[in-house]
Image (cartoon, rainbow, N blue to C red):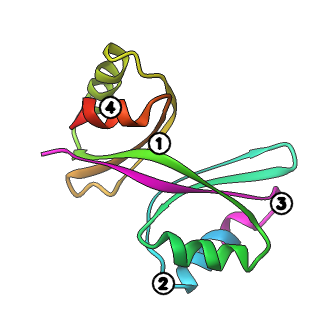
Amino acid sequence: MNIVKEETELHVITPNEPGIFGRVLGTLANAGINLRAYCVMSEEDKGHFYLVTADNKKAEAALRALGYKIKLNKVITVEVTDRIGVGAEIGALLGSAVIDIKYSYGSSAGSGRTLLVFKTSNNKKALKTLQ
């Protein structure tokens, strides 16, 4: 069974420098915050962390204390059975509904379940399409 939700993702903007990955994730770990999924990239002099956590308020407070800029994004999360082709199926459903996927990332630990995260052009319609 798929579990589909609209959730809030933290978009944390940091300096792009050696050690920033460990600093951001270590801050969350030290605060006892579980990361459910993340995507990290750099762009010129900025680091961009897209985080889905078990406790966004606590995560936001811990990261703001370090002076990082944080934006809140509404995203769709889909917890699915981890199997070949499941991402393609979701992509086809969203495409058929004329919903643009702005970006997506996922997390799986090999335990049979995968969490996929989607930022779309129409989260409300995506939520209904995938439920």
Position above or below: 25 against 97: below
State the quadrant of the N terminus. top left
Mark 2 crowdedness (10 Å alpha carbons): few <14, some 14-19, many ≥20: few
Along the line of sight, the residue nearer the viewer: 119 or 22 = 119
Q: Name the residue under label 2.
A: 32
Question: Which three-letter amino acid code belongs to the residue tagged 1?
Answer: Tyr
Q: Label 2 sits on what residue type?
A: Gly
Residue 72 in percent (x, y) is at 59, 55
Q: Do the residues labelled 4 and 2 touch (CB within 8 Å)?
A: no
- Residue where numbered disc 1 is placed: 105
Q: Looking at the picture, does residue 122 appear above or below residue 71?
A: above
Q: Answer few, some or many: residues within 10 Å of disc 1's Cα (few below 14, many 20 plus, some between 14 and 19).
A: some
Discs 1, 2 touching: Cβ within 8 Å: no
> In whole angstroms, how far apart are the C-alphas of marks 1 and 3?
23 Å
Left or right placement of residue 74 versus residue 68 in this view = left
Local SS, label 2:
loop
Q: Residue 96 carries which label?
A: none
Q: Distance from label 1 to label 2 (Cα)?
A: 23 Å
**Helix, strand or loop for disc 1:** strand
Q: Mark 3 points at which residue?
A: 17
Ranked by sequence position, the earlier of labels 2 and 3 is: 3
Tell me which label, 1 or 2, sits earlier in the chain: 2
What amino acid does circle 4 point to? Gly
Dot 4: few (<14), some (14–19), or many (≥20) neighbours within 10 Å?
some
Instruction: Measure how far apart labels 4 and 2 are at the Cα level.
Output: 30 Å
- Start-end of magenta stretch: 1-22
**Quarter of the rendering containing residue 84:** top left
Please name the residue shown 32% across and 31% down the image. Answer: 87
